[in-house]
Amino acid sequence: MPVTDFAALALAPALLSTLQELNYQQMTPIQQQSLPAILAGKDVIAQAQTGSGKTAAFALGMLSALQVKRFRIQGLVLCPTRELAEQVAKELRTLGRSIHNIKVLTLCGGVPSKHQILSLEHGAHFIVGTPGRVLDHLQQQRLDLSELRMLVLDEADRMLDMGFLDEVARIAAAMPAKRQTLLFSATYPDKIEQLAASLMQQPVRVSVSSSQATSSIEQQFYALESSSREQAVMLVLQQLQPASCVVFCNTKRVTQQLADALQQQGFSAKALHGDLEQKDRDQTLLQFANKSARILVATDVAARGLDISELDLVINAELAHDTDTHTHRIGRTGRAGAKGLAVTLADSKDDYKLSLLQDTLSDAIQLQPLPPLSLLDQAPAKAEMVTLQIQGGKKQKLRPGDIVGALTRDQQIAFEDVGKIQLHDLWAYVAVKRSAAKKALQILNHDKMKGRNFRAWQL
Ligand code: AMP
């Protein structure tokens, strides 16, 4: 019988209690297979998808090896995107919250270097970043990896796809050869093998078969026939009424067009693709995560770092160009045991791609007719929450408690009606139930927080 209990591992009691508090009761298959080797200090190549629990697997390895009193960079995680890096840093901090004074720093492109330089001067134990920016700091001699003991390449296949091979190699050249290297990748093309050969020593290989990884995902296929793609997506959305759904398209142009069309018809939809400003992308991800937007229409690249645990539907508005991408997309629903649904729209031009996909599935693909047009007569469901932006943040010493406190004072707004709060340096976002939005804006614009008035508006 496989050992599935975290307690069977050589983990510090404090880490075990954190896992218990987080309600991580059993190891996921990839954790069962990789953690013993990771904790034994071996190099490990793990073939694992997003949603498999891979982040916790390497994070627990890093946290176990950490010597917190040695204030040197001991671990580096390289990720393809900033969103993923931020998510990894978050998981490291969460899992490592019992370790006093632990410092995790993110170094990603797309944001100014100024704060990163300051933070680097203060030192850190772990760095999580994107290869370009990490190399940049290294070359400017702001980053010292000479005492690094663990290197993690997360979503290595994506990093190679994005052309980061050279950066990764140059970063690795700046660290001791005697170290532990972990490589996580959803797919396993030849170039990963070459990368592993150049960076790793006698790696242990583990994988979770894609049927095991995706078994909790039900796939449905619809034939487009005479319907437009836009209309077909609307029909599926109206039929299934998901609370949160990602719709994938193959190009930025189609992504934007589809999001526009959905918005025009009253759907709570937002576009996410690389042509948007970083600020807009951040706000979109925020609104999706805090339930102010139900539908995210995204390209594969833009959706890479997305971590939404309660995604109940993935729609492939266009069939992905290859099977790996398809698997990646649908892996975003049905995470960590929850059942997910993936709907794929296909037209006659997709026959070849469908036949390749069929080879990877145990059940026969059956193209169903689209749901009835009459579904479009009903108004689409609105998002449960709305996001309010407050012109004040950490610099003004605002804390989440100040915002919740102001909103719920004298029971003006119920505690349950206040959702996620995100604080930045100069502003903050708070999600509130749609029905409480007007009242919340009134309070935020008229009542004082930290002894002063702030401006607030709805996004
Ligand atoms: P990942 O594959 O790293 O993106 O993880 C997917 C999700 O599963 C994350 O939200 C984790 O917090 C969660 N997770 C990871 N390991 C476990 C576990 N053993 N039990 C329950 N949830 C987990």
Image (tube, grey):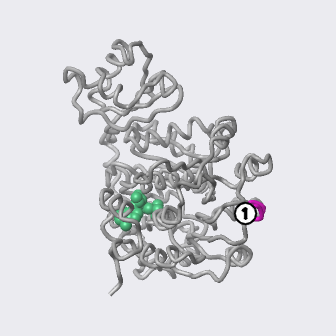
Splitting the image into four quadrants, where does ligand 1 fall?
bottom left
Which residue occupies the foreground of this view, 254 or 414?
A: 414
Looking at the rendered image, the quarter that the C terminus falls into is top left
**Relative to residue 329, is residue 277 drawn left or right?**
right
Closer to the camera in the image, 36 or 308: 36
* In-image side of 271 versus 72 (left or right): left
Three-letter residue code for mark 1: Met
Is residue 233 shown to the viewer in this render? yes
Q: Give the main secondary structure of the magenta stretch.
A: helix
Q: Is residue 270 above or below residue 22?
A: above
Would you name the residue on which mark 1 appears? 175
Whole-percent x, y for residue 267 in the image? 40, 40
Decide which of 457, 393 is in the foreground and name it: 393
Q: Quadrant of the N terminus?
A: bottom left
Magenta stretch, residue numbers? 170-174
Q: Quadrant of residue 29?
A: bottom left
Count of marks overlaid on the render: 1
Q: Is mark 1 within 8 Å of ligand 1?
A: no
Whether residue 231 appears in magenta in the rendering, the answer is no
> In percent of the image, x 69 and y 72: which residue is there?
178
In this picture, is 115 found above or below 368? above
In this view, the residue in front, 99 or 245, is 99
Can you name the residue that lies furthest to the front here? 69
Q: Residue furthest right?
A: 139
Mark 1 neighbour class, 10 Å CA radius: few under 14, some 14 to 19, many 20 or more = some
Say whether residue 335 is visible.
Answer: no
Q: Position of residue 421 (x, y in %)?
A: 39, 35
